[in-house]
Image (cartoon, grey):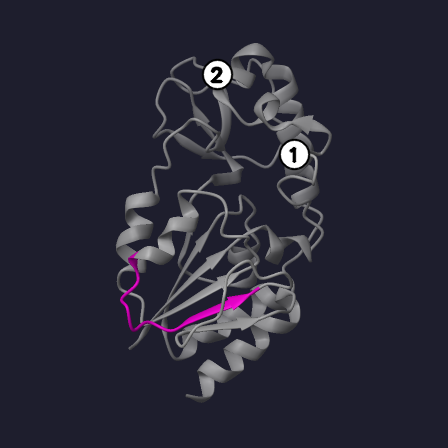
Amino acid sequence: MKKIVILTGAGISAESGINTFRDANGLWEGHDIMEVASPIGWENNPELVLDFYNKRRSQLLTVAPNQGHLALVALEKNYDVSIITQNVDNLHEQAGSSNVIHLHGELLKVRSQFDENLVLDWKEDLHLGDFCEHNSQLRPHIVWFGEDVPMMDLAISITEQADVLLIIGTSMQVYPAAGLIQYIQHHTPVYFIDPNPSITPSDRLTIIAEKATTGVPKVVNELLTI
């Protein structure tokens, strides 16, 4: 069975109503990125950070997967599919995709500051004083700026196996995720689905300049008829 690797970014979730990572001013829902997405921000004002992610978590619980997420599930009928997402929502899992790697963490999980491998499912608000079994504060299970991306090595090894690569809803400007395209084989076909594509087409790179809800079903239908 051929291997399809799918790299997704904020564009696919935006159509479900999830706010994108940052706006044109470099702000994230009115906050400087480093205030709410860095270890320094957490150290300086943990209440602000917790409130920010509580609001995002609450919003996530009100939205649903869109046609882009749902179309990807159909690929599992004919292919070995791995999704590598930069998104921290669980919309791929809600849609039914069975193999999802979250490069930047997961909004519906928290982890211990004492043991980063102690990760808990979490749908409620998180507050100061919410401790793990080691009596240590719990924090959002999010990869912040300045932190290592622990799933990156796994993502690289999966990308190296790709027979087909789909890139959906990402600018390919955020590293290290953007560098994954460098690990495919030279003959591997790539489909880039984004209404504002940031790369140039080539013999092996097909650009679909559409939003995910329309572009992804087209590519999926094409791949299922091959």
Image coords of residue 98 (percent x, y)? 42, 61
Tell me which residue sits at (27%, 60%) in the image.
160
- What stretch of residues is rendered in magenta? 183-193
Residue 11 lies in the magenta-colored region: no
Q: Report the front residue among 25 and 62.
A: 25
* Quadrant where the C terminus is found in the figure: bottom left
Q: Amino acid at mark 1?
A: Gly
| Disc assigned to residue 70 | none
Find residue 33 and report its image quarter: top right
Residue drawn at 48 percent across, 30 percent down = 144
Left or right: 105 in relation to 210: left
In the image, 164 versus 82, the foreground residue is 164
Q: Which mark is residue 26?
A: 1
Could you tell me if residue 191 is visible in this image?
yes
Q: Which residue is mark 2?
A: 137
Q: Residue at x 54, y 35 (%)?
A: 122
Q: Which of the two discs, 1 and 2, sits closer to the camera?
A: 1
What's the residue at 33%, 51% (across, down)?
A: 155
SS state under label 1: loop
